[in-house]
Image (cartoon, rainbow, N blue to C red):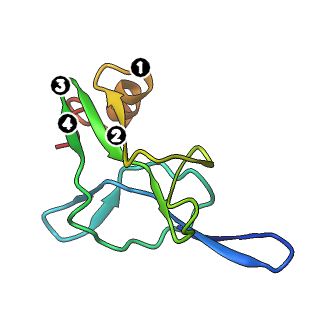
Amino acid sequence: MGPWQFGEGGATLIVADFHSVWEKPDGTIVDVTPPKFGSRVLFVPDPSLAIGRIGKAQQLHNNRTNFAQAPRLRDGNEIHEEYFGIPDDQASLVQYCKRLGLPDTSME
């Protein structure tokens, strides 16, 4: 996660991306979420942000910001919903999980 500069005054907007990580038995943390921007990520654990489920769709958190007028973003646009759903059988998710060597797309 990194700050982006916007506007004439150089106001800083910080966007927090929800990442899923896997902790190996030796304590090493592996990031299984592909980065949207750049290659540097600062992990700040937040156990309250678990992936949920409604039926056969995973419920993921939209990006949160420090900007009061747009506390959540999705694809760079203000959004009011806290979650968005990804169906378990979405082709890109299935392919990504296979690349990671995961047996399915449950992420649980």
Q: Is residue 68 left or right of residue 24?
A: right
Does the CB distance between marks 4 and 3 fall below 8 Å? yes
The residue nearer to you, when weighing 100 against 57, is 57
Question: Which sits earlier in the primary sequence, circle 1 or circle 3?
Answer: 3
Between the C-alphas of marks 3 and 2, the distance is 24 Å
Q: Nearer the viewer, mark 3 or mark 2?
A: 3
Question: Which sits earlier in the primary sequence, circle 2 or circle 1?
Answer: 1
Q: Residue at x 59, y 43 (%)?
A: 75
Amino acid type at circle 4 is Arg
Decide: is 43 above or below 96.
below
- Determine whether the residue tagged by mark 2 lies in a helix, strand or loop: helix
Q: Where residue 100 sits in the image (x, y, percent)?
A: 34, 40
Decide: is 67 above or below 104.
below
Q: Where residue 95 sits in the image (x, y, percent)?
A: 40, 26
Q: Residue furthest front?
A: 69
Q: Please tell me the numbered disc located at residue 91.
A: 1
- Provide the residue designation for mark 3: 55
- Determine whether the residue tagged by mark 3 lies in a helix, strand or loop: loop
Judge the density around disc 2: few (<14), some (14-19), many (≥20) Cα neighbours within 10 Å. Answer: few
